[in-house]
Image (cartoon, helix red, strand yellow):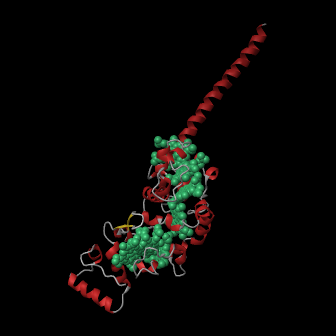
Amino acid sequence: MQFLPRPGTPAFGLLRPSGSSAAFAILLLTATAVGATSHYDRIQCLGCHGGDSREVVDPETGERRDVALDMARYRHGAHRALDCLACHERGFRSFPHNAKKPLTCMECHPREEAEGREATFDFRRWERQFKDSIHFTRHKKRFNCGECHNPHYFRVAEELGAPPEIIDTHNRWCLRCHKERAGRFPLSNPADPDMVGAHAWLPHTALHLRETRCVECHTSNAAPVSHDLLIWDEAKRDCVICHSRDTVLQRTLYRHHPEVPARLGFTNTAVLQDGYVMAANRNRYLDLLFYLVVGLAFLYVFGHAGIRWRRRRRGLSGGGGRQ
Ligand code: HEC
Ligand code: HEC
Ligand code: HEC
Ligand code: HEC
Ligand code: HEC
Ligand code: HEC
Ligand code: HEC
């Protein structure tokens, strides 16, 4: 069955090329005549899946679902240049098409022709690591890359910009399932979904969960991006992975943010841009001042003790003479 977008649907507003709508209508007709071009396909889909909200009701369960795409976010995503049918390849031209399967990440990636940043991504290693994780070993049928990475809106860390934005985005991927007891998502772990409770050993728990990424403690960090999942007693609880001069944050979260020239003698200056992290942000001059003060204190104590000792010895030998 062929479906055409209704004039006046949000799709027309969203994708109308410059020029009058009459010219656009002609363009549409031409596109139909020559056999749908890919640009035309996207408009078809958006006729029903564009706009603010497109709720559908399952006739059997009565469950409501929103099948609308947020095109503003789509246009910022890694796949903004792709047409809907690139992934929704099979079965989406006919209707209904809700039981059809789109292509998954690993069916396209790694792409041989990829260049630049994408070519440096280690898709195969990440897939191996993911397949060894409890997410996959226990939930093979349901869990795939798409549970964390929505192909419509996914953006790489470098594109996300500032680290606070990266923390927010990456943690949101996990919190989608690990947030609250009555999780909305069918894969939520009913065992202990209260994050603050599960991390009560960590001081300032809420602050840490907000200002650091889950993956900092729940992956090995063997490479800047890892998809292995450390669970239970494997997960890291050492303060020094972050609170030390050799902080992991500089290698992972801040990997696209090289150190800015050391001003006033601070270490890990990129990290310092977003807040002070004890022991990671050390100050050379303060350290020197500290050593100096401690040094002087030692000098004072030992010097004083030395003088007293010599005085006593002198006093003792003098006293012996008098006896
Ligand atoms: C005539 C309107 C219409 C057009 C055009 C249309 N769809 Fe749909 N689509 C729907 C409706 C309605 C549903 C929900 C069906 C259901 O759940 O029974 C749906 C469901 C889907 C789903 C599954 C959603 C889910 O969660 O189950 C996907 C994926 C999808 N469409 C992709 C596309 C793509 C890609 C195109 C363009 C090639 C497209 N659709 C064109 C109306 C349309
Ligand atoms: C990079 C691949 C890719 C592209 C490009 C893509 N999709 Fe999808 N889409 C998917 C995958 C994978 C799913 C299944 C997600 C899931 O099962 O959770 C999906 C799900 C959907 C759904 C179901 C509801 C939802 O949001 O999960 C709709 C509707 C949909 N796509 C429409 C579109 C439309 C319209 C376009 C073009 C503007 C498009 N898709 C482009 C991969 C893609
Ligand atoms: C239909 C095949 C297809 C599927 C499925 C697909 N991609 Fe892509 N992906 C592409 C293409 C093509 C590009 C290059 C786009 C461009 O150059 O504008 C790309 C680009 C990328 C990039 C590089 C973006 C950048 O900013 O450098 C990443 C990362 C990526 N995809 C990850 C994923 C992930 C994660 C999934 C699964 C959720 C996925 N892809 C699914 C085809 C696909
Ligand atoms: C449990 C959630 C989860 C699953 C499942 C998952 N990822 Fe990721 N992925 C993440 C997180 C979190 C990051 C950010 C890691 C980082 O930047 O250190 C990430 C980062 C990425 C990146 C971007 C790297 C960058 O520089 O921004 C790509 C590409 C990617 N994953 C692909 C995949 C592929 C392919 C799969 C399936 C084989 C997959 N992911 C499965 C959570 C997941
Ligand atoms: C789609 C839902 C979903 C997403 C997204 C998700 N998880 Fe999970 N996660 C689960 C489920 C379900 C389990 C329970 C596995 C089991 O025991 O059967 C689990 C287990 C875990 C465990 C094991 C500990 C325990 O007691 O259950 C850790 C740690 C964990 N996830 C961390 C993460 C991190 C970090 C992220 C983000 C990178 C993430 N998860 C993303 C669903 C999810
Ligand atoms: C400072 C390091 C650290 C950070 C940050 C962190 N975790 Fe944990 N997490 C741990 C450790 C260690 C444990 C094991 C606790 C235990 O044994 O009681 C744990 C336990 C868990 C569990 C299992 C709970 C249970 O009782 O079964 C889940 C799920 C989990 N974390 C998810 C997350 C998510 C999601 C985030 C990000 C919002 C996150 N963690 C951030 C270190 C951390
Ligand atoms: C994953 C990295 C990470 C780990 C692990 C970690 N911290 Fe932190 N911690 C941070 C960051 C980042 C901040 C700065 C938060 C902010 O104020 O922006 C911080 C802040 C703090 C603060 C200051 C809180 C405040 O009110 O300003 C204390 C105290 C602290 N951490 C103690 C600890 C202790 C003790 C441990 C080990 C049990 C620990 N942290 C483990 C990253 C970490």
Seen from the viewer's position, the closer of residues 280 and 58 is 58
Tell me the quadrant of the picture where the C terminus can be found: top right
Q: Quadrant of residue 1?
A: bottom left
Image spot of residue 304 (x, y percent): 64, 25
Residue extending farthest to the bottom is 34
Q: Is residue 48 above or below residue 134?
A: below
Q: How many marks?
A: 0
Residue at figure coordinates x 47%, y 57% from the top left: 176
Image spot of residue 293 (x, y percent): 56, 35
Image spot of residue 281 (x, y percent): 51, 48
Residue at figure coordinates x 62%, y 63% from the top left: 137
Q: Quadrant of residue 78?
A: bottom left
Residue 281 in sight from this viewpoint: no
Q: Is residue 242 above or below residue 142?
A: above
Q: Is residue 45 above or below residue 181?
A: below
Residue extending farthest to the front is 60
Image spot of residue 306 (x, y percent): 68, 25
Residue 158 in sight from this viewpoint: yes
Seen from the viewer's position, the closer of residues 99 and 253 is 99
Seen from the viewer's position, the closer of residues 303 and 233 is 233
Q: Is residue 312 left or right of residue 171?
A: right
Q: Is residue 10 left or right of residue 161?
A: left
Seen from the viewer's position, the closer of residues 68 and 105 is 68
